[in-house]
Every structure is written in structure tokens, then in C-alpha cells.
Amino acid sequence: MRSLLVAVSGFTLLYVATVPSAGQSFTDEDLSKPLVETRVPQSPPQSPAQSATVVVRPELTDEQLADLYMARKEYREAAQIYKRLCDQNPQNPVYLNKLGIAMHQQAALPMALKYYERATKADPMYADAENNIGTIWYQRKKYGKAIRAYKKAIGIRPEMAVLYSNLGYAYFGERKYEEAISAFRQALAIDPELFDRGNSRSGSVLQDRSVEDRGKFYFLLAKSFAQAGNLERCLIYLRKAKDEGYKELASAKTDPAFAVMLKEPAIQEVLAPKQVENTQP
């Protein structure tokens, strides 16, 4: 049993959620179990003589409370509230998508997919949910299905950099490296600092950056930045590829994408073969 204290307009709301223990699977029945809500009066407010400042806190809506649970990583509690909202508003794509994310965060992928798909049926132009369907398939290594979902999301919201980034990861998973580079370049054209931030597992649009061959992945990112003329980030990811022991790092010397960058001393230093130290006296 978990609880969350929220102070609002003269009361402290104590929300106590009874949920399945860790490791148990989820069902719609689990999500439908009501939260127990208890209102606990706070101590009387100070008199005007004691305090001249009055702070008014509006009461939280159910959605705001669920969002707060999500921010605190209390995903089970958030899921219960989102489920209630979905039952009350079965055609609301935002609630359905948020419930999907709450289940996704608990690795309940079948249920997450169920609600993402319901969100896209409620609103076929809801790119967030379409993207999140792609992340389900990506995690399951069904890269072809992930690519189709990401492309569909891009068709709806072509201005969202994260969608191209996710598409690039899916292409990388399928070993379609040139397509991956193209997608990454499109992402960087929209948001040059996209790859400087960590994974996003919050909000309404998810992204997953897990890859198996990190050396090659970093090399491809370096190539994307080289093509974009960004020396600083090209250098960063070349160094990361080298640190990962990427065996084909020297191929940058003959790759036209790196032609301009090869004139830079810092790039030459990264691409120089490691010197073997002589340990003999």
C-alpha cells in the first residue's frame, strides 16, 4: 500500500492506493479497484496578525493527480486514476495514451499496446500514441513494425525531431544504416541538441535509445554530425565510438562524409592508431 500527501486549499489530501504487489501481472480489474481517499484537516490557519500572506492552492484534478504520481514514478497509482478517467471518457485519446504510458513504465507491454491502439482509434491523427506503439515494437525487436509506426507518426507531425530519432534507431536495429543516418540527420536539422539529452520516458511521447552495437551507433552519429558540418559533436561521438572499441573507426578516413572534418587536428588525433607502449627496460 502506498500513499501520497498533497496539500490543497485548507486540506491535506491523503490518497492511499491498494495495488498488486511487485511482480504481479495486471488486469483491467486491478486497475478498476478504487483508490481510498481520506481528507485530513490541516491545523487552523494563522490569524492576519500572525501572517499577512494568504496562499491559495487550487484542488488537483484527477488528471493532475495522476500526472503527479507519474512524476513521482508511482506508476501503479497513476494507472488506476488514468483507468478511471478512461472509463469515464472512453474516447479521450490523451487519457488512453497516458494509461498506456503508465503500463509501459511497468513493463506491462501488452496492456500498454492495447491502450495506445485505443488512443489511435479514438483519434487517428494522434501522433503521440502512434509513436508509442512504435516504441513497443522496438522493444520487442520488431523493427519493421516499429518503422511503420514511426513513419505514420511522422506523417502526422513532421516537425517533431524525436520521431525521426526513433525512426533512426529502428533502422539501426534492422541494420539499414544509410536510412538510419538519413533519419538522424532529419532529427538534427530540427533539434541540433536532441542527442545531448537522455532517454525520454515521460510526457506523452516516448523514446528508446537502447542499441546493441554502441560503437557502430556512435560512429553513425558522428557521420551524421560530420554531414551537418558540426565538428564539436562529430568529435564527441567519434571519441565515444573509439572508447567502445569500434573496429572500423579508420573507415572515416576514406568516407566522403568525413572529408571536411579530416582536416581538423582533433579528428586526426582520434583516428590515429593507438601507440603500443614498449614495456621492455
Image (cartoon, grey):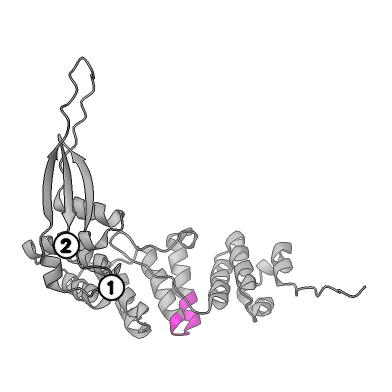
Residue 20, horizontal then vertical, whole percent: 20, 68
Q: In the rendered image, which residue does mark 2 sit on? A: 80
Mark 1: few, some, or many residues within 10 Å (few <14, many ≥20)? few
What is the CA distance from the residue labelled 1 to the residue labelled 2?
17 Å
Residue that mark 1 sits on: 23
The percent position of residue 18, horizontal first and vertical second, equals 17, 61
Specify the segment rendered in magenta.
173-181
Residue 32 located left or right of residue 170? left
Specify the farthest residue to the right: 281
Residue 110 location, quadrant: bottom left
Q: Nearer the viewer, residue 37 or 9?
A: 37
Is residue 180 within the magenta segment?
yes
Q: Nearer the viewer, residue 180 or 45?
A: 45
SS at mark 2 in the image: helix
At mark 1, the secondary structure is loop
Specify the farthest residue to the left. Answer: 88
The quadrant where residue 125 appears: bottom left
- Name the kind of residue labelled 1 in the image: Gly
The amino acid on which the numbered mark 2 sits, given as a three-letter code, is Gln
Query: Which labelled disc corresponds to residue 265?
Result: none
